[in-house]
Image: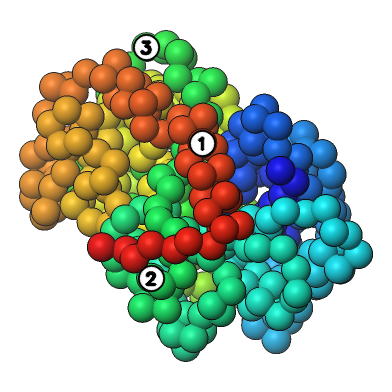
Amino acid sequence: MNILLNAGPWLPVPPPGYGGIENVVATLIPELRARGVRVVLASVGSSTIEADELISVYDEGQFPHLQKPYNQVMGLAHAHQARVAEELRRRDDIDLVHDHLEVVGPGVLAALNGPPVLHTLHWDLRKHGAFYASFPEKIAVNGVSRSQLARAPEALRRASLGAVHLATPLAGSDLRVERGEHLVVMGRVCALKGQHIAARICQKLGLPLRLAGPVSGLDTPAALEVVTQDPGHPLHGHPDVRYFVEQVTPYLDGDRVWIGSVGGAERDTLYASARAALFPIQWDEPGGTAVVEALALGVPPVGLRRGCLPEIIDHGRTGFLADTEEELAEWILRVDEIDPDECRREAVRRFSPAVMAERYLELYERAIRRTPVAVR
């Protein structure tokens, strides 16, 4: 099978730090190629993942530009997708397009007389209501959790081939470092992720906390300070910056800190040395990559019972789920009851790259045959 895997123009594959979709793509490609699939990757030129071909418009990721006004960035995704369309028009050896580019991907691909398309939905499906209400019938989709698809508009449910849980590389799962007392929250710092709740609880309980992830695309405390000290900076009034300054920083001190974005071995060590990973999410999280990463490194996840978390965390065995902030604090104090090795075993059994690749191969075949099933 030959596929064109469209990661979009935002970050290289793999990303140097934060990058959910790009990390998923980087996890999937080696597994597909090991199974004889030839992969043409559509990304940016700085991608380093080994693929059979790489096509791109931009040398570097365009993610930093996403914070600019819409009329300045509206052409970024379209320029990338126009390059994908050009590639599909000039060749006839692509059996399927596996698309990960929000809205613009299926919007452009539906207008082509090209190969079958499987479009993966990574985001909140309450967005883009008008587009999803009249979703192109020729495009097959998959979700990243059952809970995500259960909330999908009817047009997407008709196009769905099912859900494929996200996976994480298991290379660091055998990492054994001394476990500390700190808790960790990994992910983009924004109100939906609930870092303020984690910081407030940890301050109340007297527990150390490490917040890791970008704030409005800013990866370091120094970069964020430049923005907060300059009222004229374009990001000064960004909602994520305001959220961090107004709702998170009041709870930060020497024991509870934001360290910026981390990736690779640094991220694995931060996770593996943590007492627990916290997920006080304030929305219905569709995918939960960070939860899977924690499990793979033997770190018990403790989160609110929303979105995909009940599908990933087996309460009492591989982590804890709470319905309120008060319950979350109570479960945090009981994380030592969770066996780290059981977390690792669950990650291997359900969320390994091999499991995800095999599931996608099934969906590729079904997308080619186009036999959708209803989401129950």
Question: Which quadrant holds the C terminus?
Answer: bottom left
Label 1 neighbourhood size at 10 Å, few (<14), some (14-19), many (20+)? some
Q: Nearer the viewer, residue 134 or 343?
A: 134
Horizontal side, residue 189 vs residue 299: left or right: right
Residue 117, given in percent of the width and then of the height, sits at 63, 63
Residue type for callout 1: Glu
Q: Which residue is mark 1?
A: 358
Horizontal side, residue 184 vs residue 322: left or right: right
Residue occupying image coordinates x 72% and y 49%: 3
Residue 314, given in percent of the width and then of the height, sits at 19, 36
Label 3 neighbourhood size at 10 Å, few (<14), some (14-19), many (20+)? few
Mark in front: 3 vs 2? 2
Work out how far the residue at label 3 is from the one at label 2, CA to CA, in angstroms.
46 Å
Provide the secondary structure element on which disc 1 rests: helix
Provide the secondary structure element on which disc 3 rests: loop
In the image, which disc is placed on residue 178?
A: 3
Residue 90, given in percent of the width and then of the height, sits at 91, 64
Residue 222, given in percent of the width and then of the height, sits at 60, 49
In the image, which disc is placed on residue 136?
A: none
Residue occupying image coordinates x 59% and y 36%: 27
Provide the secondary structure element on which disc 2 rests: helix
In the image, which disc is placed on residue 157?
A: 2
Residue occupying image coordinates x 70% and y 32%: 36
Residue type for callout 2: Arg
Q: Nearer the viewer, residue 131 or 249?
A: 131
Determine if residue 131 is in view. Answer: yes
Horizontal side, residue 7 vs residue 163: left or right: right
Q: Quadrant of residue 342?
A: top left
